[in-house]
Image (tube, coloured by chain):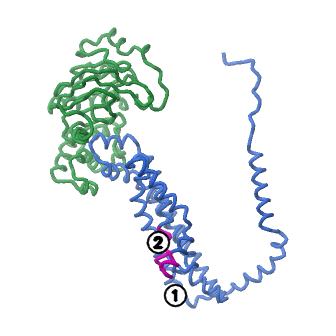
Amino acid sequence: MTSSDNPIPPKPFNPAPAFIAVWFAVLWASCLGLDISFTDLLTGMDDMGEYLSRYGTPDFSDLSRYLELLAQTVAIAVCGTFLAITFSILLAPTAARNLTIGPLAYRAAREILNFMRAMPDLLLALVFVAALGLGPLPGVIALGIHTAGFLGKFFAECLERVDPGVIEAMEASGAGRTQTLMYAGWPSILREAAGYSLYIMDRNIRMATVLGLVGAGGIGLALHDTLRLFEYNEAAALIIVIFVTLLAFDYISSWIRKKIS
Amino acid sequence: MAKINMCGVRKTFGNGHTALKEMDTEFQTGTFTVILGPSGAGKSTLLRLVNGLEPLTSGEITVDGIPVRGKNLKKIRGDVGMIFQQFNLIGRLNVMTNVLVGRLWNRPWLTSVLYLFGREDRAIAEKVLMRVGLAEKAWERADRLSGGQQQRVGIARALAQEPRVILADEPVASLDPVTGDNIMQILREICDRDKITMIVNLHQVDLAKRYADRVIGLNAGEIVFDGTPKLLDSSILSHIYRRNSVVKETTPDALLAYA
């Protein structure tokens, strides 16, 4: 019964080589368009070495000021993350297909989240610095808006994975939408949501150091100033402080995330 | 305490599949009815129509004279408890909170979304939890319990509603025979003591014979048998479970309707 005289059918077309070829063609065209030349890179090696050597003796004499600025950077990230979490908690249920109010509200919530996610935080920070002036507040708002787009989408997708049977049981017992959300929705996704919020927090600390460069407060602003004044030793100290902090937060957050999942 | 009336009830799903065809029947107060029938006969649909989880295509269902539709739904769902094959508890919440879910329909939403319940609600929850014999598990996470214990929490949740009707959709299908029998005993006892109208979908004919006052045989959306369990013999059973009239459905909607 299982044996058959039919020959093996023709081998199906494998698109992988074509994809790889297209990828390299695009890469080559891009390099050509950007005038990237590898000889420049090689001849520039000596100059690069000379430039980097200027950072050789980090100057930590102003460490207490750096740490203060660092604390400000972390505070910006904390406030931005809090803003993002608040936004997402309000928007995510409407952007979850199983808990939304109606198709129109669902669409609207999804589009708002898409828009927030699509706006780069550096760009938002530039806009808000122009509108609100230099300082931490534009940084907080920029981080809050951009990462609310991420968190909101993630929360919504988590909520959509909640067991439909559990939601139906809530509905069958006469519970309303908000009650269903508070009992079957959030508790079921609490771990994932906490883990992802931590990740966003980690990411926001990283981003907050850069936001200073456009005037949105924190340690980035100091780095910007030292580089502009060619104070390489101070800049080196700042870079080391930033690097150690980011590394530490990365370890802490991934350790906590492993603990809760 | 409640009488359910079905008049010309018909249910056709969006894909054109008719799950129930012109059904007229009633369920008397405090009776224990078991619905038997092959998968896809419309048993689940029938239950889900009674508390409005599915809207009717035509006809009318009333619970104590109140039609199941529109503005009445919240009140009716409060009066009608439901028990599920997969228990459908909130796994990450403790047993007590899962039982208190049965009180939500009767609570103002502002306090209830903050997990604040009245003393009265807590007393009811404690009482029903003791009744299903799970008082000592009150503060344990629901997903740590065994299947039989989870189903007892499901029963407690339904009882916490202080319902007049309980619908049970294959309540023992995921349990071993001994545990399943135990669950059926609890349901029978609730029916007898509280005069709660009980409608139970089952696949186990022996359980139907042992616990039901009345058996309805459903096949392809039609009642093909309606009588006391004593009348169930092999010819009637083969009539209830005959397969030739069942339309093969494989679309997701139709499968859902059978679930």
Magenta span: chief secondary structure: helix
Q: Is residue A52 left or right of residue A254?
A: right
Residue B179 is at least partly visible in this image = no
Magenta stretch? A128-144
Q: Check disc 2 and give the amino acid type.
A: Ile
Quadrant of res A46: bottom right
Q: Check disc 1 and give the amino acid type.
A: Arg
Q: Which mark is residue A65?
A: 1
- Residue B191: % across, % down: 18, 30
Of helix, strand and loop, which one carries label 2? helix
Q: Kindly identify the residue that appears in the image at 59 percent across and 75 percent down.
A: A243
Q: Is residue A34 left or right of residue B65?
A: right
Chain B, which colour? Answer: green
- Residue B220: % across, % down: 38, 19
**The numbered mark 2 sits on a residue in which chain?**
A
Circle 2 Cα neighbour tier, 10 Å, few/some/many (<14 / 14–19 / ≥20): many
Residue A260 vertical placement versus A35 (above, below): above
Nearer to us in this view, B149 or A245: A245
Residue A223 highlighted magenta (yes or no): no
Residue at the far bottom in the pictured view: A61
- Residue A39: % across, % down: 85, 71
Chain A, which colour? Answer: blue
- Residue A40: % across, % down: 83, 73
**The numbered mark 1 sits on a residue in which chain?**
A
**Residue beneath label 2, please?**
A141
Q: Is residue B86 left or right of residue A31?
A: left
Residue A43 is at least partly visible in this image = yes
Q: Earlier in the sequence, mark 1 or mark 2?
A: 1
Of helix, strand and loop, which one carries label 1? helix
